[in-house]
Amino acid sequence: MKNYLENIDREALRARAEQMLGYANDARSQASRWTDYAVTKARGFSLFDFAVFEACLLSLGLWLGTCFSKFFKKFRGVLFVAFTASWLYLFWRVFFDSDDE
């Protein structure tokens, strides 16, 4: 065990740790930019847009719940279609709708 600890290249470990910290900082800054963008776009949402967002979350939750429940299995397709339609609308509204009021 003593020989193993003596053979560790501490500079290589330090360089690798600094590289990983650089990747983590890049990921954090990218997530921060995306979050800021999404919040800015959400400020322009109407009441209808928030209702669609809630329907999107509700249908996703119900659809996921049906994967574990025998009672709702017959509604899985309908719930998935509702989730997909609301998700596509919100995706379009956030990224492609340039109608800024």
Image (spheres, rainbow, N blue to C red):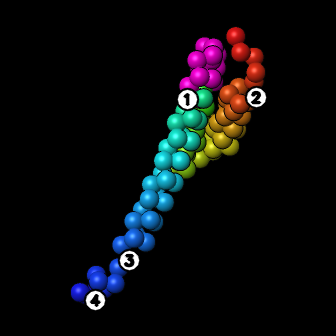
The residue to which callout 2 is attached is 96
Residue 3 seen from this side: yes
Q: Earlier in the sequence, mark 4 or mark 3?
A: 4
Q: Residue furthest left?
A: 2
Q: Compute the Cα span from label 1 to label 2.
A: 17 Å
Badge 4: residue crowd in 10 Å (few <14, some 14–19, many ≥20) = few
Q: Earlier in the sequence, mark 1 or mark 4?
A: 4
- Image: 69 above or below 91: below
Of marks 1 and 2, the one in the foreground: 1
Q: Which mark is residue 36?
A: 1
Question: CB of mark 1 within 8 Å of CB of mark 2?
Answer: no
Q: Quadrant of the N terminus?
A: bottom left
Q: Which mark is residue 3?
A: 4
Q: Earlier in the sequence, mark 1 or mark 3?
A: 3
Q: Compute the Cα span from label 2 to label 4.
A: 60 Å
Which region shows up in magenta?
A: 38-52
